[in-house]
Structure formats: C-alpha cells, structure tokens
Image (spheres, rainbow, N blue to C red):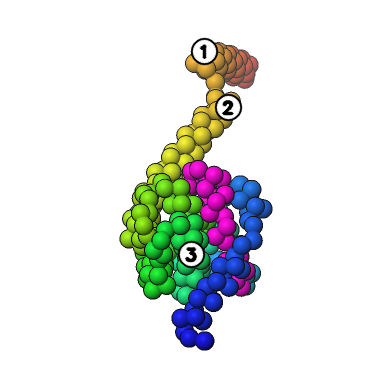
Amino acid sequence: MSNKDLTTTTQTSFAALVKKSLSCLISQEPSNNGSSNEKRVTRLRDSFSPLQLCSLFNPGLQSTLPSKCKSIHIATYYEEAPTLGEMARAYGDMVAVAFLKAQFIKINDFAGSKQKISDGQLEDLSLQIVAEYPHLNLLEVIVFCGRLRSGMYGEFYGSVDPMKILYGLGLFCKDREKDISRYETAREKEELARKREEWAKNSISWEEWQAIKAEAEKKKFAQMIIFLAITCIYDYISLYLYMQIR
C-alpha cells in the first residue's frame, strides 16, 4: 500500500470513528471558561485518549450544534471543551491537526463541490489554524464549521477553498468578540441591578433618615438635660455639706 493510500485509509477510519452523538454535552448549560493552564492539560490527558476526545467533539455535531449556540459565547464559556492549544499541548500538534482535518473533511463532503480540498491543503490549513487560533475551543470550531456550511461566511463555488475557510474564520472570530461583549455587558447590567436591589432592601428613605436624625437629636437633648440636672444636684449637695462643716 502506498503512503497516499495509507493516509487516505487513516483519514477515512478517523472520519468514521468520530460519528458519535454529543447530545448530552450540548444540552448542558455553559459555565465560565478559565484560562489555559497545565492542570487543565494534565486533566485532559488523564481523562481522554485522543480518539475518545475526537469522538466526543465529532464532525456530526456540525449539523446540530450551531442551533444550540446561536450566540457564540455559549460555546466559548463551556469550560469542559478544551482549546486547540490545550489539545496540542496534551497530545501533540498533529492530534489537533487531525481533529481539524476531520471537521473539514465533513465540510468537503457536505459541499458537494466537484473539486475537493486536497490532503496537502487540509494539512496546511489545519496547521495554520492551530498556530493562529489556539484560544478557540473545540465546540467553537464545530460551531464555525456549521455556520460555514450554512453559508454565513460565504459560499464555495466549484471547490472548497482553504483561503475562504480562513477568511470565514476571521469573520467568525469578529462575531465571537461581539457575542462575548454583548454577554459580558448584559451580565454586568444584571449584576448591577442585583446590587441595587440589595441596596434598596438595606437602605432607608430621606424621610426615614430625617425621622431617625430627629429622634437622635431628641435623645441627645434629653441626655444633656439629665446631665445638667445631675450636675446641679451635685453642686447643691456639695454646697450644703460645706455649710454644715463650717
């Protein structure tokens, strides 16, 4: 078997492997995604083999995941989804490349173009994306591929063009920034509204403050009168005792 045939067979086997559903994953709520660190990379390596991870984040999700993530931040903040950079650090760059190639093979088959993207183009395209977009997580990549299939970032005429894919990925990242900004702004507004509600519960009105102030002044005046009275009585007793002694 030639090297070319072996490569084609390997791709076909890999593409066939990553067909399982991820419905249990996409049905869960996203949570805040932390920065990449060695603990996440180590946990990833200890929890999944490369094939297991790729079977979870499989190309079949391209048809369903975008509808679950109409705002990209939902995929961005899903902390269980490793980034391309974390995947590469856990298993090596070529595993991340293999993941991307499987996603693009799915697009290649879906597009129905006469001229398919070549293996060399797939390799170069995937390597460039791993190098330039290590911060994107695997769910985001799948959402991008699904949007690409929907024609959101242009159409393929006659062939699947790697340059169009990279151009579309640039547009996707701009949408990503906008969605994250909208989400963060909305979250900050909600947090501010919550704090204001707490302040309102624990605060008092101007009229209540004036009443409390007036009551405090009355108590202060009463205490002063009592002090003066006690002082006068003390002086009177002192004078009386002095007169008795004389």
Q: What is the spatial separation of the Cα atoms under label 2 and label 3, in whole angstroms?
A: 59 Å
Which residue does the numbered mark 1 point to in the structure image? 207
Q: Amino acid at mark 3?
A: Ile
- CB under 8 Å between discs 2 and 1: no
Q: Residues within 10 Å of mark 1 (few under 14, many from 20)?
A: few
**Relative to 28, residue 46 above or below:** below
Label 3: element kind: helix
Is 176 covered by the magenta stretch?
Answer: no
Q: Which corner quadrant holds the C terminus?
A: top right
* Residue located at (41% from left, 64% from top): 116
Q: What is the spatial separation of the Cα atoms under label 1 and label 3, in whole angstroms?
A: 71 Å
Quick one: label 1 or label 3, which is nearer the N terminus? 3
Question: In the drawing, does residue 242 fall left or right of residue 104?
Answer: right
Which residue does the numbered mark 2 point to in the structure image? 202
Label 1: element kind: helix
Residue 172: x, y in percent? Answer: 40, 51
